[in-house]
Amino acid sequence: LKTLTELLPTHAQAQFFAGTIAEEAKDYKAARTYYNAYLKIAEGNSTYIKDAAWVRLGAVSMAQNRPEEAIEWFHRVKKGDLVVAAHVQEAQLLDYLGRADDACGVYRTISTKDKAQKATFLSGCAHALTRASRPLQALSTLEEAIDLLGKELKATPSILYEAGSLCVTLKNYKKAEKYLTQYTRLSPKDPQGFNSLGYMLLDNLGKTKKARPYIEKAMQLSQGKDSYIVDSMGWLLFK
């Protein structure tokens, strides 16, 4: 790599290629040098796209456990094919650092015409708010995503499961039952949905008879191999 970049010191693609090789070899110091060399050559030259180097430098910063630095690199990407992925990475890092409002700000500003993708970003915001111990705001954000999707919920039913689970945490069992029931209808092969609904009805509301078919369905789908579902069945039989 050293020979290549010394022979072609002003060749942008050679520098970028050297950066990718160094990154794959986990020589992150060298990777930084090559990517920055590419950016220096690309400065003022519209022929070269800087976005790819910014994204790679963000990835290198992540590999070196430098999240704040990685955020700065990903934030530089403003357009093109890499912008969505870069800003999702930025938002996830902000969430990791406990900066929920900043994470939500990034998620909400990612431009997309795809409702399912937009709902996924709202779910990411809700996750950040949940981690920040703000479940009411998280639920409100998930309900925003549910309203956005409307009849297209079948494409992203997991949002219903997330909303139902948050409602259980908030002891809003009426809403929890509503969302978890919707989820089981849209994801009839997922045992976790039936188990969560059944266990909530059993343990939180004491509705043993109503809970039974859901827990039995969860047992059937999981073939008795899920310890949490087996535990629910044991509790049901005890009740």
Image (cartoon, rainbow, N blue to C red):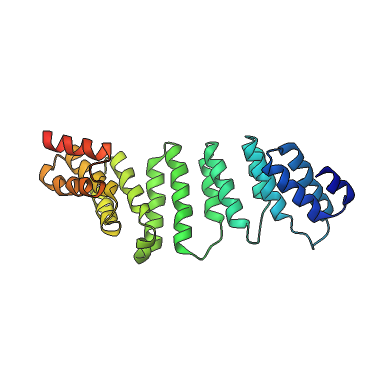
The image quarter in which residue 198 lies: top left
The one of 96 and 125 positioned closer to us in this rendering: 96
- Would residue 72 be seen by someone viewing this image from the given angle? no
Rendered location of residue 150, percent (x, y): 36, 64
Q: Viewer-proximal residue, 83 or 19?
A: 19
Q: Position of residue 20 (x, y in %)?
A: 71, 48
- Left or right: 103, with 174 as reference point: right
Asked if residue 187 lies left or right of residue 123, the reply is left
- Residue at horizontal 40%, vertical 55%? 144
Kindly identify the residue that appears in the image at 20 percent across and 48 percent down. 220
Q: Residue at x 83, y 43 (%)?
A: 2
- Using the image as rendered, state which of residue 93 and residue 145 is in the foreground: 93
Marks counted in the figure total 0
Residue 213 on image: x %, y %: 15, 49
Tell me if I can see residue 10 in this picture: yes
The N terminus: image quadrant: top right
Q: Residue at x 51, y 41 (%)?
A: 100
Viewed as shown, does residue 62 lie left or right of 189?
Answer: right
Q: Is residue 194 left or right of residue 57?
A: left
Position of 165 relative to 10 (above/below): above
Q: Is residue 77 above or below residue 198?
A: below
x, y percent for residue 239: 11, 35
